[in-house]
Amino acid sequence: MKTTARIAKNGPRIKDHSACAYKLLAINDALDVLRGKWKIQIINTLTFGKRRFKELQREVNGITAKMLSKELRELEMNELVLRTVRDTIPVTVEYELTDYGTTLDKVIDELSDWGMKHRKRIIKKR
Amino acid sequence: MKTTARIAKNGPRIKDHSACAYKLLAINDALDVLRGKWKIQIINTLTFGKRRFKELQREVNGITAKMLSKELRELEMNELVLRTVRDTIPVTVEYELTDYGTTLDKVIDELSDWGMKHRKRIIKKR
DNA sequence: GTAACTACTTACCCAAAGTATACCAGTATA
DNA sequence: TATACTGGTATACTTTGGGTAAGTAGTTAC
């Protein structure tokens, strides 16, 4: 029977499913945090320092107030960004990366490194 | 004028925009490759060895033939996965990670590590 | 009084992503 | 003869992500 032979050749079919599933969960958790057209651009902008809402809107090119507000809320929920309402006139709101937010640096750098290699590789082929 | 003071406090407003934009491009290139509900699960499954189409469909829980076919085609286009048609009866098609595909390991591990920490952190708060 | 600044929210719309179901041709098995 | 295997494709449907445009509320400058 073919199937049996193929299993043997392909290496282990039985794997630690719970560890594997947990790893996949974790990866998806990380990607969820970064998901969305603007998340990384916002995080990146905030690595240069605190920004107010309108400042962010000007620096993150093309983003609308709705999307900025939504993405910031999600980043805040994940404790990556700290929102501070300042008692000025008019009221201003400051956003900054939390210490926890900066722990994403390694992930982002890794993505960036791989992305650059990939970009070169794929462009070269065309 | 408040604004002037704020700029000084917040550090450099002028940054190397071209380097920065290039980095963002690279990150998005990497995320594009991983985008899609099933990509990472497929890659992960293939790290355990070659798989045929139907084998993948059984192992990647819940995926439809249409999505599997589409995601595999995209992975193949990005040279992460090699597709081999074998002259058996019936014809079988084998998918495997390319060497290039395995260079994603570091990125995926980084995502996984951060995701696990994040998962623990967020769950603890509830 | 009206425009412009602050920081948003709301309602509506479209396109892309994903799901469900059926179908194809060829071969083997009960 | 009917069923199940191989690797997909075709069609229709729903869900989601994100864009557009307008509104809100309070303050200030012209």
Image (cartoon, coloured by chain):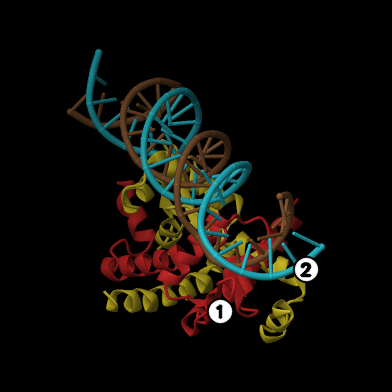
Chain colours: A yellow, B red, C cyan, D brown
Residue type at mark 2 is Ser
Residue toward you, B83 or D2:
D2
To which residue does mark 1 refer? B105
Residue at 59% across, 64% down: A100
At label 1, counting other C-alpha atoms closer than 10 Å, the crowd grade (few under 14, some 14-19, many 20 or more) is some
Q: Quadrant of residue A53?
A: top left
Report x, y in % for residue B13: 31, 61
Looking at the picture, how far across and down is residue A30, in whole percent? 59, 62
Residue A18 numbered tag: 2
Which residue shows up at 61% across the image and 74% down it? B51
The disc labelled 1 sits on which kind of residue? Asp
* Residue at (42, 62) in percent of width and height: A44
What chain does mark 1 sit on?
B
The tag on residue B37 is none
Name the side, left or right, on which C5 lies relative to B42: left
What is the x, y in percent for residue D21?
31, 28
Are the residues at dot 2 and dot 1 in contact (C-beta closer than 8 Å)?
no
The x, y position of residue C10, in whole percent, is 49, 26
Q: Is residue C19 left or right of residue B126?
A: left
Comparing A67 with D3, the one in front is: D3
Name the secondary structure under disc 1: helix
* Horizontal side, residue B35 vs residue D21: left or right: right
